[in-house]
Amino acid sequence: MEYYDSNTVLYLNGQFVKSADAKTDLYGQSLHYGYAVFEGIKSYNTHNGTRIFKAKEHFDRLQRSAELMHIPFPFDKNELIRQTYKLLEKNNLKDAYIRPLVYCGTNMSLSQATESSIVIMAWEWGAYLGCNLQKVCISSYQRPNPKSTHIEAKASGNYINSILATTEAKNKGFDEALLLDIDNYVAEASGANIFIEKSGKLYTPSLGSILPGITRATVIKLCKTLDIECIEKKITVEELKNADSAFFCGTAAEIIGIGSIDDTIFPATWTETLGATIQRTYKALVLEKQNYEVII
Ligand code: PMP
């Protein structure tokens, strides 16, 4: 995977610089302790031009993550959105993945950051989990205890847990890991939220031990439009394994069906599930197709 070449530029603290020339200090807390916050955003080549999906929501979450982590956020979010559009233009990108990262200055102590930088990068990235139904295992790793960190912040250090979980899942021959929370309720995947379908209704884990996904919120809204009952609650592994179908959702993963969890295969045919309906509707929404709700 090539993220940049000699022509690529990134946005760094108000300026566009060549990615190959950009530098960072190695004496910093972000690199050593994972003390940084970031976002994962997508832009789409729509018939209305290149559009960054839910740009405001993503930059709002970036700021909230920084505040929760006591990392200064002296940036104007509207200006960041404007500069992100410029970044896409300069790199000739339309369908792109956009990665803003707020990281800390020179400081090797375990004290709160007093200065920060922002870098925004973009590259072409296909569907994060691919297009096939996912073969998923329940991870032996739990999501971090929400009392040991701010799990609702998209903080770099939290992703060590995600790397461990996906590494274990892939080594065991699965596509993706599903992590439980500290009370053994279903939480989320390494980089996506989960919904299950049972008897014509959708269920998703309530907030508390998960990243409050922007796609998750979009799916909940779509359910209202589509008159699908969607319930946020604590979900047990037994409920999960007795579901008719299930899917992951996330900015990079979009909506992707789950074929099986451990040895349990979901009985419903994917194309006939509520997840498949949400998948089609979500695609129409991000592409700004008119009357997306009547397409189904
Ligand atoms: N959970 C985790 C752990 C994630 O990394 C992501 C991806 N950001 C999500 C859920 C989905 O969040 P979103 O829909 O905002 O991309």
Image: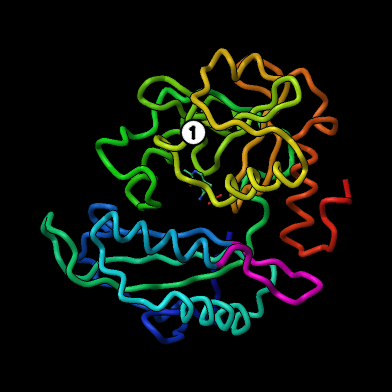
Residue drawn at (29%, 54%), measured in percent from left and top? 68
Left or right placement of residue 105 versus residue 164 in this view: left
Residue drawn at (80%, 40%), measured in percent from left and top? 277
In the rendering, at what x and y percent does residue 16 appear? 46, 85
Work out whether 273 lies above or below 99: above
- Local packing at callout 1 (Cα closer than 10 Å; few below 14, some 14-19, many 20+) is some
In the rendering, at what x and y percent does residue 222 appear? 70, 47
| The quarter of the displayed image where residue 159 is located | top left
Which quadrant, please, contains the N terminus? Answer: bottom right
Left or right placement of residue 86 versus residue 279 in this view: left
Provide the residue designation for mark 1.
Answer: 206
Left or right placement of residue 251 versus residue 118 in this view: right
Left or right placement of residue 142 versus residue 121 in this view: left
In the rendering, at what x and y percent does residue 122 appear? 55, 69
Work out whether 144 lies above or below 62: above
| Callout 1 amino acid | Ser
Residue drawn at (47%, 29%), measured in percent from left and top? 179
Ligand 1 closer than 8 Å to the CB at disc 1?
no
Work out whether 40 lies above or below 276: below
Instruction: Between residue 7 and residue 139, name the one nearer to us.
Output: 139
Residue 54 on the magenta segment: yes
| Count of labels in the image | 1
Which quadrant, please, contains the C terminus? Answer: top right
| The quarter of the displayed image where residue 104 is located | bottom left
Main secondary structure of the magenta stretch: strand
Residue drawn at (36%, 56%), measured in percent from left and top? 65
In the rendering, at what x and y percent does residue 245 appear? 71, 25
Q: Callout 1: helix, strand or loop?
A: loop
Q: Which residues are magenta?
A: 42-55
Instruction: Between residue 192 and residue 93, name the one nearer to us.
Output: 192
